[in-house]
Image (cartoon, grey):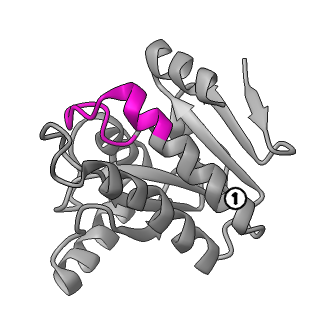
């Protein structure tokens, strides 16, 4: 079941982000940009070597990607044309600007999408896996940040929150 909001500009689905036919998918990357576990590993595996090669170029140029920032590469073998890599914060109890850094992940990814004329973009549940960000808090930040951005910016036509598990899907459904 898909839920939609704001004239169909924001929606939520339960599924595998690597299978979506959108202009860009967002990768919950690590600072090295060299792949990892979870959604990061899945995107690199399905997308192929081209994504890793472009990440290595970015890494050599700027030393990786800072927490809350975003960079863009091709989608490689994915159905999506682009991958926007953003580094979510590791949860340390909430007293290290984790909320602001997570919000920045969404804002910077959306800005990068605008700069690249991306009309449809899909987000995973950033930082809620091995980075241990509380899922309900992360969902609230994600939804509120994207809603605010979409109200102020009209160039992106569709944002999809892709939840891999039932718990996140249920949380996002309540938020939307």
Q: Is residue 68 above or below residue 168?
A: below
> Is residue 134 magenta-colored?
yes
Left or right of 156? Residue 99 is: left
Q: Residue at x 40, y 37 (%)?
A: 138
Image quarter (top left, top right, bottom left or bottom right) of the C terminus: top right
Can residue 164 be spotted in the picture?
A: yes
Q: Nearer the viewer, residue 48 or 21?
A: 21
Q: How many marks?
A: 1
Could you say where residue 76 lies in the image, as x and y percent from the top left? 47, 59
Q: Residue at x 37, y 27 (%)?
A: 135
Could you say where residue 72 lies in the image, as x and y percent from the top left? 44, 70
Left or right of 119? Residue 49 is: left
Could you say where residue 18 lies in the image, as x and y percent from the top left? 51, 40
Magenta region, residue range:
126-140
Query: Which residue position is annotated with label 1?
Result: 150
> Is residue 16 magenta-colored?
no
């Amino acid at each position: 079941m898909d839920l939609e909001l704001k004239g169909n500009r924001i929606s939520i689905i339960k599924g595998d982000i690597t299978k979506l036919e959108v202009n860009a998918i967002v990768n919950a990357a690590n600072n090295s940009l060299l792949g990892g576990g979870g959604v990061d590993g899945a995107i690199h595996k399905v997308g192929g070597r081209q994504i890793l090669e472009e990440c290595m170029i970015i890494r050599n140029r700027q030393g990786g990607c800072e927490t809350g920032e975003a960079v863009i590469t091709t989608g490689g073998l994915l159905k999506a044309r682009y991958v926007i890599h953003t580094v979510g914060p590791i949860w340390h109890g909430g007293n290290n600007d984790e909320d602001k850094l997570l919000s920045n992940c969404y804002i910077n990814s959306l800005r990068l999408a605008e700069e690249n004329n991306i009309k449809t973009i899909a987000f995973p549940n950033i930082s809620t896996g091995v980075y241990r960000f509380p899922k309900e808090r992360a969902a609230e930040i994600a939804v509120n940040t994207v809603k605010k951005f979409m109200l102020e910016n009209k160039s992106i036509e569709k944002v999809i929150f892709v939840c891999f598990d039932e718990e996140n899907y249920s949380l996002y459904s309540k938020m939307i």
